[in-house]
Structures are given as structure tokens and as C-alpha cells.
Image (cartoon, helix red, strand yellow):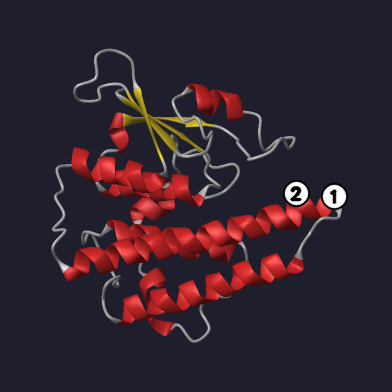
């Protein structure tokens, strides 16, 4: 296979990439390499940092997409990292061209950035509550500040859902990358037991249309999940 996705199913960024690959019918071209990484040494979280770095991502973060047949490359493979850029590569590989001159294009980019941004904020909360608290270093004002970002982000996504930038999907209706990013983001916060639904009815309707979508079910986000052998 010309593509290898280095991932973990608990990573919302990994899930976003794989859901998009499923939506674009590219998943059959991807082999999966499940790893654990963390920004600092932590037993059971950081075992594969050096492996991911050696695969072409010096930051040693997931997801990383290893491309063996990259156009114009003379031998070897290319590691594409940061989930946004992996998604852009998959769209290009699927032959999808986006109209960068349209207002909708930039609204969708904003949705994608907001979804990833509030996910980033919550992951910082996780590190504060797990890694730093164990050492007596938890800084509650930092946690509170990240959660303020998260709530503002939910309000923004509610507005975008109300305006139809991210919309309710039925059946096999095509979805945008922004919609994939938003749906995966909301699922991540559900797993974190963060209440984003109160006062955000449009966003809730959007998410409900995703909960049983095939790509979303196949790329389930649990520690034991194996996307290579999905149970539908």
C-alpha cells in the first residue's frame, strides 16, 4: 500500500483523518500503524515517540501519514504531519478542488480551525490534570482559561450550524472536511463528559446526524478500537 497512517484511535486528530479517508473512499489505500506518543516521557503514553520521529515527523505527534508514492519524489517516502495538512493531501488525492475565492470556503476553514483549536485546549487540560497534577503542579487558572476558549468555540460552532456552514446530513449525502472536523471534535468532548449541548440546539441536531454515519462508526474512538477490523 502506498499510504501508512500512524495513529491512535483515542486521538481525535487521527480519527478526523480516517473518517475523511472513509468518506473519500481512500481507506482501502491506507495501512494502519497504531502507536502511543506523548510530549514528555510517561509510561504507556510515550512508548513510540522515537518510532514516529523516524517515520518522517520530527515533532513525534500523531497522526502522521507516510506516503511512498509521493509525486516527484526520487526514492524513499514522505511523512505528512499535522492533521489539517494530511486532510488537504487526501482531498487532493481524491481529486477534490476547493474554491478558495468563495466566502463558504473560508467559513469552513474557520470551522475546522475552531474545532481543532478547542480540541487543542482540552488536551492541554488533560495534560494539566494528569501529568502536572501528579507532581503537584496543576494550575487551575490555566485550566479555567482553556475551558473559556472551549465554550467560546462551541458558541461559534453553534452559529456556523445555524447558518448552514455545517449542516444536518442524511444518507450518503457528501460531507465537507469542516463537518468531519466538527463532528469528531464534538465526539471527543462527549468522551470527556464536557456538556456542549445546553443552549446549542443547532449544533446538537448537526451532531445527531453523524452518530450513526458509517464512517463515524467504523472509526470508533476507544482504546481497544482496531479500525482494520471494524464491527458495524
Q: Is residue 95 above or below residue 73?
A: below
121 on left or right of 116: right
- Residue at 53% from the left image edge and 57% from the top image edge: 120
Asked whether the beta carbons under mark 1 and mark 2 sit within 8 Å of each other, the answer is yes
The image shows residue 184 at horizontal and vertical percentages of 44, 58
| Residue labelled with disc 2 | 131
What whole-number distance in Å separates the C-alpha atoms at marks 1 and 2?
7 Å
Above or below: residue 66 compared with residue 182: above
Residue hosting label 1:
135
Residue drawn at (52%, 27%) of the image: 53
Report whether 94 appears left or right of 49.
Answer: left
Residue 161 in which image quadrant: bottom left
In the rendered view, tell whether residue 213 sits above or below residue 168: above
Q: Furthest residue to the bottom?
A: 199
Instruction: Classify mark 2: residues with Cα within 10 Å, few (<14), some (14-19) or many (20+).
Output: some
Q: Position of residue 67 (x, y in %)?
A: 32, 26
The residue positioned 36% from the left and 80% from the top of the image is 159
Task: Tell which of 204 and 106 is nearer to you.
Answer: 106
Check the image and report above or below for 169 versus 71: below
Amino acid at each position: 500500500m502506498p499510504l501508512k497512517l500512524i495513529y491512535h484511535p483515542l486521538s481525535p486528530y487521527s480519527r478526523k483523518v480516517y473518517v475523511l479517508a472513509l468518506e473519500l473512499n481512500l481507506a482501502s489505500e491506507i495501512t494502519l500503524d497504531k502507536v502511543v506518543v506523548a510530549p514528555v516521557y510517561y509510561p504507556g503514553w510515550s512508548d513510540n515517540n522515537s518510532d514516529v520521529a523516524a517515520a518522517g515527523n520530527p515533532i513525534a505527534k500523531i497522526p502522521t501519514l507516510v506516503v511512498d508514492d509521493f509525486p516527484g519524489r526520487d526514492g524513499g517516502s514522505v511523512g505528512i504531519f499535522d492533521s489539517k495538512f494530511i486532510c488537504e493531501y487526501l482531498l487532493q488525492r481524491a481529486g477534490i478542488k476547493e474554491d478558495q475565492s468563495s466566502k463558504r470556503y473560508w467559513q469552513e476553514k474557520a470551522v475546522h480551525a475552531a474545532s481543532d483549536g478547542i480540541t487543542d485546549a482540552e488536551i492541554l487540560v488533560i495534560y494539566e490534570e494528569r501529568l502536572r497534577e501528579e507532581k503537584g503542579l496543576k494550575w487551575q487558572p490555566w485550566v479555567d482559561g482553556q475551558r473559556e476558549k472551549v465554550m467560546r468555540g462551541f458558541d461559534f460552532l453553534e452559529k456556523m450550524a445555524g447558518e448552514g456552514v455545517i449542516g444536518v446530513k442524511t444518507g450518503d449525502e457528501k460531507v465537507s472536511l469542516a463537518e468531519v472536523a466538527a463532528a469528531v471534535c464534538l465526539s471527543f468532548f462527549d468522551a470527556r463528559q464536557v456538556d456542549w449541548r445546553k443552549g446549542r440546539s443547532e449544533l446538537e441536531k448537526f451532531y445527531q446526524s453523524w452518530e450513526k454515519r458509517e464512517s463515524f462508526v467504523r472509526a470508533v474512538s476507544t482504546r481497544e478500537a482496531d479500525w482494520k477490523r471494524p464491527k458495524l
